[in-house]
Structures are given as structure tokens and as C-alpha cells.
Image: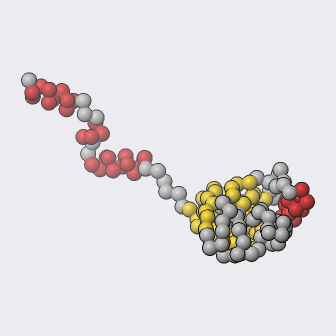
């Protein structure tokens, strides 16, 4: 009776468990997810400017904002459409206090104190982008008015 039960249970075993090792390896290789390359970009936020590379590669990009200044800082990532300019963004932001409706916002870091860091990751396609610190300074003027805005090109 035990022998019959053993053969019955063995017959229920999925065929993948008894597949030759080389066939299992091929199956695993074809079904494994592809690794995504992530580009790391260091951005130093000072009082009142960003220091970062002017170009990055398209794909997944992680920005590491490090506050090397004495004031609080943050970083907003905005896509700049080809039909618009950095000046148009700044004019609308400084006069009306809003991000233009034609400008997609892709993300924003936390506001960080001096000697702190934060991260922002986004999937970027080729084009132009703006890094901007949109918080007001102690004097009430936006950090972008003081020069804390940077155009970056994604290839």
C-alpha cells in the first residue's frame, strides 16, 4: 500500500521539478527580469546655487542633493518643454508664484538642513529639465530669484 501511495504522490510532482538542469537554467535565464541601470548624480545645494553636471544620460536617474550651504534647501525637478525657455519659467514663478501649467513637475525632495542629504529618482527621457529650489529665503525672496536654479540636459 505504501509503495502505491509513493508512486501516486510522485505522479503529482510538477514536471519542472524533474526537468534536466540545463533546461531549468535556460528557463530561468529567459524569465529573469533585466537589470535597470541607474545613473547617480550628485547635486550640491549651496547658498544660492546648484552644482551638478550639465548633462546626464536618459533612463532612471537618482539625484543626491547634499546641502553644503547655511540655509534650508530642496530641489524640484521640472521638465522644460522645447517650446518654452528657462526665462519664461522664472518670470511666471517670480511674478505669480506658480509653476507654469505647461511645465510638468516630476518630483521634489524633502527640505533639508545644512550638512544633510536627500534623494530624488525619476525616469527621464531626452530633453531639457530644470532643477529649482522653490522655498523662500529668510528675506522672503525665493531661492530661484537668488540663482538657485539650474538647466540640465538629458541625452
Between 81 and 155, the one lying in front of the other is 81
- Above or below: residue 122 compared with residue 12: below
**x, y (%) of residue 64?**
61, 67
Taking the image as drawn, is residue 86 in sight?
Answer: yes
Between 107 and 141, the one lying in front of the other is 141
Residue at 77%, 70% (x, y): give it: 148
Taking the image as drawn, is residue 52 in sight?
Answer: no
Q: Quadrant of residue 8?
A: top left
Q: Quadrant of residue 5?
A: top left
Residue at 30%, 39% (x, y): give it: 16
Q: Name the image quarter holding the C terminus.
A: bottom right
Q: Quadrant of residue 119?
A: bottom right
Q: How is the image coloured?
A: secondary structure
- Above or below: residue 19 compared with residue 96: above
**x, y (%) of residue 93?**
85, 59
Residue at 76%, 52% (x, y): give it: 104
Q: Which residue is most to the front?
A: 138
Amino acid at each position: 500500500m505504501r509503495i502505491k501511495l509513493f508512486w501516486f504522490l510522485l505522479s503529482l510532482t510538477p514536471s519542472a521539478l524533474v526537468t534536466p538542469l540545463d533546461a531549468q537554467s535556460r528557463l530561468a535565464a529567459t524569465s529573469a527580469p533585466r537589470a535597470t541601470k541607474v545613473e547617480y548624480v550628485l547635486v550640491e545645494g549651496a547658498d544660492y546655487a546648484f552644482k551638478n553636471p550639465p548633462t546626464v544620460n536618459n533612463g532612471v536617474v537618482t539625484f543626491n542633493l547634499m546641502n553644503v550651504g547655511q540655509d534650508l534647501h530642496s530641489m524640484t525637478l521640472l521638465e522644460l518643454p522645447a517650446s518654452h525657455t528657462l526665462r519664461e519659467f522664472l518670470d511666471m514663478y517670480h511674478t505669480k508664484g506658480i509653476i507654469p501649467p505647461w511645465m510638468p513637475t516630476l518630483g521634489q525632495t524633502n527640505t533639508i538642513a545644512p550638512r544633510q542629504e536627500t534623494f530624488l529618482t525619476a525616469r527621464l527621457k531626452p530633453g531639457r529639465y530644470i532643477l529649482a529650489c522653490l522655498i523662500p529665503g529668510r528675506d522672503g525672496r525665493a531661492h530661484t530669484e537668488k540663482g538657485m536654479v539650474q538647466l540640465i540636459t538629458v541625452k
